[in-house]
């Protein structure tokens, strides 16, 4: 994202990171069966990033099945990275972990789930 936009920046706690005052979230939108499919998601991300948004939020429970929204977001970002529209290092991407499936260790905040959940 261009630091010369009119976007306001805020510190993310004590991490040293600066994030846009507005984030882009995928809640209730990103899903092949929902209102935003992959092609539309690429366009939305492109517009958000061009507007100065560098903070992108997701969760493993968004979408029709655990991880669907994260997967589609990953595909969309992959396209933007491949086209040199944005660098991965310019973005702060977050996800929320807790309720990722039906397996014995797919839920909660165990160290195992926190480490493995984002990799699924």
Image (cartoon, grey):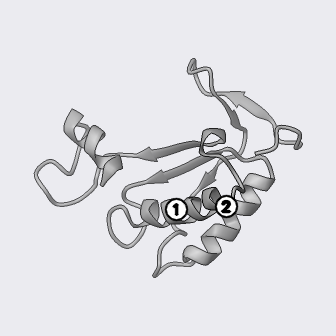
Do we see residue 106 in this rendering? yes
Residue shown at 51%/65% (left/top)? 75
**Residue displayed at 58% across by 22% down:** 13
Q: Secondary structure at mark 2?
A: helix
Lateral position of residue 7 relative to residue 93, left or right: right
Toward the viewer: 86 or 103? 86
Give the CA separation, mark 1 to mark 2. Answer: 9 Å
Asked whether residue 36 appears in the rendered view, the answer is: no
**Label placed on residue 45:** 2
Q: Secondary structure at mark 1?
A: helix
Q: How far across and down, in percent of the image, does residue 45 sit?
A: 67, 61
Question: Is residue 53 positioned above or below 34 on the image?
Answer: above
Q: Is residue 6 left or right of residue 13?
A: right
Q: Position of residue 90 (x, y in %)?
A: 66, 40
Are the two marked residues, 1 and 2, in contact with CB atoms closer than 8 angstroms?
A: yes
Q: Earlier in the sequence, mark 1 or mark 2?
A: 2
Residue at the location (71% across, 29% down)? 10
Q: Which mark is residue 107?
A: none
Figure check: 96 above or below 14? below
Residue 73 is labelled as: 1
50 in relation to 108, above or below? below
Screen quadrant of the N terminus = top right
Q: Residue furthest left?
A: 104
Farthest residue toward the top?
A: 14
- Please tell me which residue is depicted at 88% across the width and 43% down the height of the picture: 5
Q: Position of residue 55 (x, y in %)?
A: 63, 44
Q: Nearer the viewer, residue 46 or 80?
A: 80
Label 2: how many residues lie within 10 Å, few (<14), some (14-19) or many (20+)? many
């Amino acid at each position: 994202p261009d630091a010369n936009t009119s976007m306001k920046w805020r510190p993310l706690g004590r991490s040293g990171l600066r994030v846009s005052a507005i984030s882009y979230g995928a809640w209730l939108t990103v899903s092949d069966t929902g209102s935003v499919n992959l092609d539309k998601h690429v366009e939305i991300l492109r517009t958000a990033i061009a507007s100065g948004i560098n903070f992108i939020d997701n969760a493993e429970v968004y979408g029709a099945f655990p991880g669907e929204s994260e997967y589609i977001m990953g595909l969309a970002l992959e396209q933007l990275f491949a086209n040199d529209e944005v660098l991965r290092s310019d973005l702060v991407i977050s996800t929320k972990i807790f309720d990722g499936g039906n397996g014995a260790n797919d839920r909660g905040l165990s160290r195992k789930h926190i480490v493995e959940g984002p990799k699924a």
